[in-house]
Image (spheres, rainbow, N blue to C red):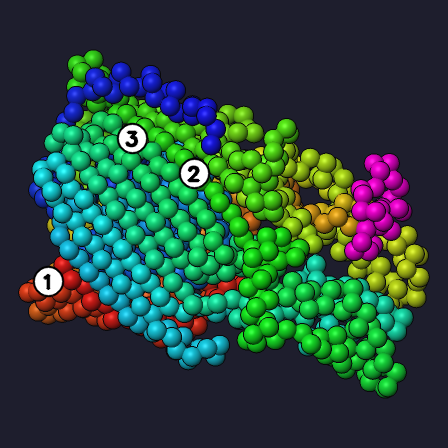
């Protein structure tokens, strides 16, 4: 690691004198001011507080932006198998499922399977996998035994948090050992894959334990552990991504020799060749393997944490937390991956006082023996027989078949069988041995290994300057607030020679690569009008990221509360997302396509000398059509269609940017404030989406780029063959400016007799795209979704239940893997519970997707069916 002191630490030197002079006050004193008396102040509804929206405790009714909260009671009532899966039932939140052990949270559109636009925190600490730039589900998060509450901010939170939180943020609060001591144990056992055509039923098991103890009035600790085992959901989509690959020859559907099923690998574009057979050009793909052939669906996660809390004074607490996780599951980015012995660990130190919060944490990631399913499949094929040899055998067999009188389509089937003779067969010892060998070769042109070691170091501090000045008798008016924060983050990558290198000139390519950011914010607020009915805040954030100039994020909010029950809010804010490590620095040989980061230091010269793959595909198709149907020679067809080639118009990465306007209304209604109503509307503008583009550089016979002055005919001749192309997949920015809008309405009703009922509806719509080039991330969001819930912890003595119904509309899914429509689906979750007071036992019999109607949450993902479980909890 570098010896240079992070900028944050230099800044901290100036804060220390101020921090040391601040008086320490009780936690109760930092809570919001007492609610105005109206005869309802004792209700829990009006007293409920949140932190995530403004970084200070405030009434949930008076939050200046939309914030959703799952309380301990709601989590007990949920029929979802875990608190993390219960988030899918929150208003305005979308969850997609790449794996049984890996779910992705998003809000307000533009989601994908690795959502780096939505931040996930545990007690304010980012739990992302550093090289990915986003979390892997909840593998580094708390267990059901240690979760206290969940707060979610749908929409940009970048002005306060930075951290690329332009689509939203979730913060998971855990139980403090001073306030929640004792032993808790939980066992879940269940079954999934019932009536699954891909496999038989499989057992699911999760064992969790928590122990917390107060050793003295100043010292307490807690430990947690969870071990989960199951069988992952299976991806089995047979849809052909390349249905028109041989349309000019009339070979469609099952007769298409270039078929590329979604859930099959090794038959993608880089695994296809143009073969001249019988005077026509045919596109032919290698055979490939189905996903179940190259993945182990046995899922397991072992996660653990320990925390030591020390009270320096009755109101000042210092806590050290260690978290670790080892896990195996299926993960998806542009390709699907087998995560095998993946390891994450995190050390965190936090200081909490009424006026000052400070934390520092260090996260380490090791991808273990993980591998890329696509590279695995294509190199299983190539290790059996190289492409050139396979093509020769295919051609010879096709010629022999047609000469013997076979029809063209049958000849292609015969040729494939002949070329595949001796191919490694799934499940055989030879296949498994070769799979293990390829999983350990760290070059995706030859093997499939994902070998990354990455680290993240983060430090931040926040001071409530307004309260400090008042307590120091500096004269700040009681109606004014002032808050400031500062943070620094550095990523460290150990280059592996394939996935990452150190590109800095003069540096050893194997030396540690660093990538850092420093930022801070100032937030000023005022409470105006009689009874403090108007609350205004203004926030300004500045971030300086390596390789980019300073970016500023403002936020302006207003909350008008004519009465305690009714609160109207308005906010405007902007946010930036800086490129992740993978987007900025990747250096992957991926299936004969080089995927490189979009920073100039990685891709200089490639943008300027390449041609769009989309135009090359159109050019190649036109050449094939002219040869096959118009009788032109290949050289004539090339000359005729060379004008279709388009020079790459894209350039080096810039940060993404969003501007967001939001209006909302939240109210506590009916006698006793039993009904909580919340409605919001937003309008967003995005520009500079970080996206991928494929572009090929024309090369000569020696593999060197053609000179800058080469004429178009020479360039077209080179690009017309695979050997004349240096293929790249580049991270860049879309040229589109995109507008989307939406809103949601949520109702939560405390019914007499202990019932809790809920209903919400969410609307999200892509408004328009200006100067659209198609590179922006797909909106990938249903236009309509709604949730209905009803539960009671004790409907009769010791017996309770919870039911949740969720429906979402059909939507268009656009990812790098596949695009198309995701059918509408609905799920019914239900649970029945029984509690024994002595001993303190709680039984829950539940099911997610009770009716077992299999669905996919995005194209290319697995089919998700019912999960039926029995949960026994002691001591919670």
131 or 248: which is nearer to us? 131
Circle 3 residue: 358
Q: Earlier in the sequence, mark 1 or mark 3?
A: 3
Circle 1 Cα neighbour tier, 10 Å, few/some/many (<14 / 14–19 / ≥20): few
Q: CA distance from mark 3 to mark 2?
A: 17 Å
* 5 relative to 367, above or below: above
Label 2: few (<14), some (14–19) or many (≥20) C-alpha neighbours in 10 Å = many
Give the numbered dot on residue 168: none
Q: Quadrant of residue 536?
A: top left
Position of residue 55 relative to residue 234, above or below, is above
Label 1 sits on a secondary structure element that is: loop
Which residue does the numbered mark 2 point to in the structure image?
A: 456
| Residue 570 at x, y percent in the picture | 35, 36
Q: Which residue is mark 1?
A: 840
Rendered residue at 85%/59% (across/down) = 623
In the rendered structure, which disc, 3 or 2, sits on the residue that comes first in sequence?
Answer: 3
> In the rendered view, does 672 fall on the left or right side of 4?
left
Q: Quadrant of residue 265?
A: bottom right
The quadrant of the rendering that contains the C terminus is bottom left
Vertical arrangement, residue 523 with respect to residue 706, above or below: above
Q: Are marks 2 and 1 in contact (CB under 8 Å)?
A: no
Magenta stretch encompasses residue 709 = yes
Q: Residue shown at 86%/86% (left/top)?
A: 404
Residue 535 in view in this figure: yes
Q: Which residues are magenta?
A: 700-724
Identify the secondary structure beneath mark 2: strand
- Residue at the far bottom in the pictured view: 405
Horizontally, residue 314 falls left or right of residue 466, namely left
Residues at marks 3 and 2 touching, judged by CB atoms closer than 8 Å: no
């Amino acid at each position: 690691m570098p010896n240079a002191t992070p900028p944050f630490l230099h800044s901290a030197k100036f804060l220390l004198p101020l921090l040391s002079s601040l008086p320490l006050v009780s936690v109760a004193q930092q809570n919001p001011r007492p609610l105005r008396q109206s005869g309802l102040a004792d209700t829990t509804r009006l007293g409920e507080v949140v932190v995530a929206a403004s970084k200070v405790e405030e009434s949930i009714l008076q939050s200046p932006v939309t914030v959703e909260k799952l309380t301990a009671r709601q989590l007990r009532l949920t029929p979802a198998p875990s608190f993390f899966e219960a988030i899918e039932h929150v208003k305005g939140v979308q969850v997609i499922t790449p794996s049984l052990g890996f779910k992705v949270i998003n809000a307000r559109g533009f989601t994908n399977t690795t959502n780096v636009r939505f931040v996930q925190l545990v007690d304010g600490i980012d739990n992302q996998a550093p090289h990915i730039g986003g979390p892997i589900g909840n593998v580094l998060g708390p267990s059901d035994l240690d979760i206290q509450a969940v707060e979610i901010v749908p929409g940009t939170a970048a002005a306060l948090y930075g951290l690329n939180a332009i689509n939203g943020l979730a913060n998971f609060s855990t139980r403090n050992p001073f306030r929640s001591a004792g032993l808790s144990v939980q066992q879940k056992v269940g079954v999934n894959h019932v009536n699954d055509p891909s496999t038989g039923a499989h057992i699911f098991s999760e064992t969790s334990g928590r122990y917390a103890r107060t050793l003295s009035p100043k010292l307490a600790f807690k430990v947690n552990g969870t071990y989960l085992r199951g069988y992952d959901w299976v991806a089995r989509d047979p849809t052909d991504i390349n249905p028109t690959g041989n349309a000019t020859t009339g070979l469609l559907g099952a007769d298409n020799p270039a078929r590329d099923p979604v859930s099959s690998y090794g038959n993608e574009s880089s695994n296809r060749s143009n073969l001249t057979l019988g005077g026509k050009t045919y596109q032919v793909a290698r055979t490939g393997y189905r996903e179940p052939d190259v993945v182990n669906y046995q899922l397991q996660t072992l996660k653990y944490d320990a925390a030591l809390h020390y009270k320096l004074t009755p109101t000042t607490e210092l806590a050290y937390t260690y978290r670790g996780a080892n896990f195996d599951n299926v993960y998806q980015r542009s390709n699907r991956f087998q995560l095998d012995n993946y390891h994450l660990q995190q050390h965190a130190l936090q200081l909490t006082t009424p006026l000052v919060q400070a934390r520092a944490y260090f996260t380490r990631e090791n991808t273990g023996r993980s591998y890329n399913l696509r590279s695995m499949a294509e190199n299983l094929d190539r290790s059996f027989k190289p492409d050139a040899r396979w093509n020769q055998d295919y051609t010879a067999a096709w010629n022999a078949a047609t000469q013997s009188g076979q029809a063209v389509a049958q000849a292609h089937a015969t040729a494939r069988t002949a070329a595949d003779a001796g191919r490694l067969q799934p499940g055989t010892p030879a296949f498994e041995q070769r799979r293990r060998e390829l999983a350990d070769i760290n070059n995706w042109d030859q093997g499939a290994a994902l070998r990354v070691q990455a680290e993240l170091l983060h430090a931040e501090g926040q001071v409530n300057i307004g309260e400090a000045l008042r307590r120091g008798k500096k004269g700040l008016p009681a109606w004014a607030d002032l808050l400031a924060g500062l943070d620094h983050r550095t990523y460290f990558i150990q280059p592996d020679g394939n996935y990452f290198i150190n590109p800095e000139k003069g540096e050893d390519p194997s030396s540690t690569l660093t990538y850092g950011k420093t930022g801070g914010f100032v937030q000023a607020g005022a409470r105006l009008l009689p009874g403090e009915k108007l609350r205004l805040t203004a926030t300004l954030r500045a971030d300086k990221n390596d390789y980019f100039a300073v970016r500023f994020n403002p936020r302006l909010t207003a909350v008008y509360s004519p009465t305690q029950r009714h609160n109207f809010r308005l906010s405007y804010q902007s946010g930036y997302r800086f490129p992740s490590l993978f987007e900025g620095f990747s250096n992957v040989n991926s299936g004969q396509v080089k995927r490189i980061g979009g920073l100039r230091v990685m891709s200089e010269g490639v943008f300027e000398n390449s041609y769009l793959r989309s135009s090359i595909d159109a050019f190649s198709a036109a050449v094939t059509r002219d040869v096959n149907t118009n009788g032109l020679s290949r050289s004539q067809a090339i000359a005729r269609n060379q004008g279709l080639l388009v020079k790459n118009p894209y350039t080096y990465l810039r940060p993404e940017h969003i501007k967001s306007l939001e209006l909302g209304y939240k109210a506590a209604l009916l006698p006793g404030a039993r009904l909580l109503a919340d409605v919001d509307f937003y309008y967003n503008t995005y520009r500079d989406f970080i996206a991928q583009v494929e572009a090929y550089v024309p090369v000569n016979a020696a593999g060197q780029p053609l000179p800058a002055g080469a004429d178009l005919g020479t360039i077209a001749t080179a690009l017309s063959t695979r050997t004349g192309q240096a293929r790249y997949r580049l991270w860049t920015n879309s040229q589109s400016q995109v507008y989307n809008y939406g809103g949601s309405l949520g109702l939560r009703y405390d019914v007499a007799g202990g019932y809790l009922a809920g209903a919400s509806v969410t609307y999200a719509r892509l408004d328009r795209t200006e100067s659209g080039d198609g590179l922006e991330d797909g909106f990938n969001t249903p236009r309509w979704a709604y949730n209905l819930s009803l539960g009671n912890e004790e409907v009769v003595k010791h017996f309770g239940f919870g039911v949740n119904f969720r429906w979402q509309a059909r939507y268009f899914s656009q990812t790098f893997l596949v695009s198309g429509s995701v059918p509408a689906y609905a799920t019914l979750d239900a649970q029945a519970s029984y509690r024994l007071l002595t001993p303190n036992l709680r039984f829950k019999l539940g099911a997610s997707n009770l009716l077992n109607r299999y669905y996919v949450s995005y194209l290319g993902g697995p089919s998700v069916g019912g999960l039926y479980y029995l949960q026994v909890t002691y001591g919670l």
